[in-house]
Image (cartoon, rainbow, N blue to C red):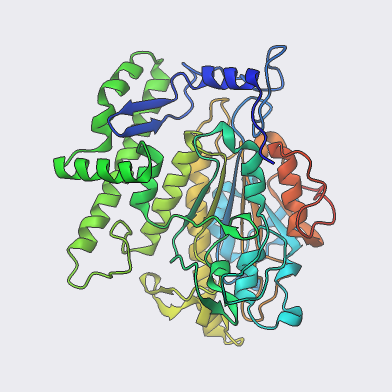
Amino acid sequence: MIQKPTKSAETTFTMMNRRRFLRGLGVCMALPALESIAPRRLFGADAPAGAEVLHATTATGAPLRTAFVYFPNGAIPASWLPSGEGKDYTLNKTMEPLAKVKDKIQVFGGLTDLSATPGADGGGDHARANGTFLTGVRIKKTGGNDFHAGVSADQIMAQQIGMITPFRSLELSCDIVQNFGACDTGYACVYQHNLAWSSPTTPMTPEVNPRLLFERLFGAGPRSERKQNLALRQEQQRSILDYVLNDSHALAGELAGRDRDKLDQYLTSVRDIEQRIQRSEKSRAGAKEPDADTPAGIPESFTQYVRLMYDMLFLAFQTDSTRVATFMIAGDGSNRDFAEIGIPEGHHSLSHHRNIPETIKKVAAIDLWYATQFAYFLEKMENTKDVDGNSLLHNSMIVYGSGNSDGNRHTHVDLPIILAGAGGGTLTPGRFVKQPDAPMSNLYLSMMDRIGVKGMDRFGDSTARLANI
């Protein structure tokens, strides 16, 4: 059940939001946390007597953000697993890009997704890996519209704390979306193309179009109005920032020097993203043989595409537009090629490497590419200060992983899982932690506790809360 904030919480939230947005014709831009206009410890443990403490908040009063990032087809274990244990661990080849944030992540060994194992259902490991990763509930094997999964961990969180932000949750992907037909050995495509589920029969379809995500974050009104406003801006060749120019100048006059710099950097970031989307739209429109199935705003480079989506997720967290997000970079079973890094073969095809050294080397290079993009996002979060002086990454819990372990054998034990961030000081990053045969759902229960979810004794196939995190 969705819990509504109390009257006192609503009043405090309104005070905090007095200057949280820049507004203009068809534009409503959320702002990053600015100390000049927002109390530093508004909802913290040391808040004044009688003040309402909201969910998804750290002890200092900063927002506590949660994200689940999914990469497909597992990882080469020999290149993924670190050596050593606890604080004394060494990153393996696949995780080398995370060296700068090594003390900000926990690498887990031994976590399982038993709901994805074959059992009597036979084949379909990719559909099960994807469809059960955040639910811990076995999916119904059907190729029709009578599909049935479970409520995902992110949506349990969103249902209880999502009312305190403009967006209850955000769902992103850089893959195609197909919510009809059968895809993997008799399983409905909907399982492979969705990570988040608000009910067992309701997938939260991710946004794959950067332009539509940008308009959702910074536009105003329903989708039809945002589309009209975009057409007007494009006709007039104006930036979205042009419509909030007066409001941004007025706000700058209210801010201290450090906050003025922060506002300027934020507006520059928004404009940079807008220009990157515009360049992609022009590039695809001018192509000799444009792909009719590919939205115009998607960059031709997969690296640029993924980073663009990471950048918008970063802005959503920085502006407290949401505190819950999922980013399914690609659905399990993805056979995307990686020609831009010299690998023209499909990822899924390569993942069945049959122990051929050269093929294993190519899969490990793809695993490294995914880890490099994740490192890009984490470094950006770590290098950005939150309202309490800590980094955005410190005040976050970010799961990175796959529902397959060894893609060659379709195993779902000892999954490749990283938990980044300190959860506002409630987590112990900088370790390699072995959790023998513990369900992923145990980790999610522990994360729910930190974000303020109430009334959850069990989740999915959980057996207990994961204590050592």
Q: Quadrant of the N terminus?
A: top right
Q: Give coordinates of residue 387: x percent, y percent.
A: 54, 26
Q: Give coordinates of residue 26: x percent, y percent.
A: 30, 34
User: Horizontally, is 205 left or right of 12 in the view?
Assistant: left
User: Horizontally, is 380 left or right of 4 in the view?
Assistant: left
Q: Quadrant of residue 49?
A: top right
Residue 314 or residue 172, whichever sits in front: 172
- Up/down of 229 relative to 342, above or below: above
User: Horizontally, is 18 left or right of 210 in the view?
Assistant: right
Q: Identify the residue shown where x is 65% and y is 43%.
A: 157
Does residue 85 appear anywhere in the picture? no
Q: Identify the residue shown where x is 55% and y is 63%.
A: 71
Residue 271 or residue 361, whichever sits in front: 271
Q: Identify the residue shown where x is 40% and y is 41%.
A: 217
- Up/down of 451 relative to 8, above or below: below
Residue at the extreme front: 146
Q: Give coordinates of residue 229: x percent, y percent.
A: 26, 40
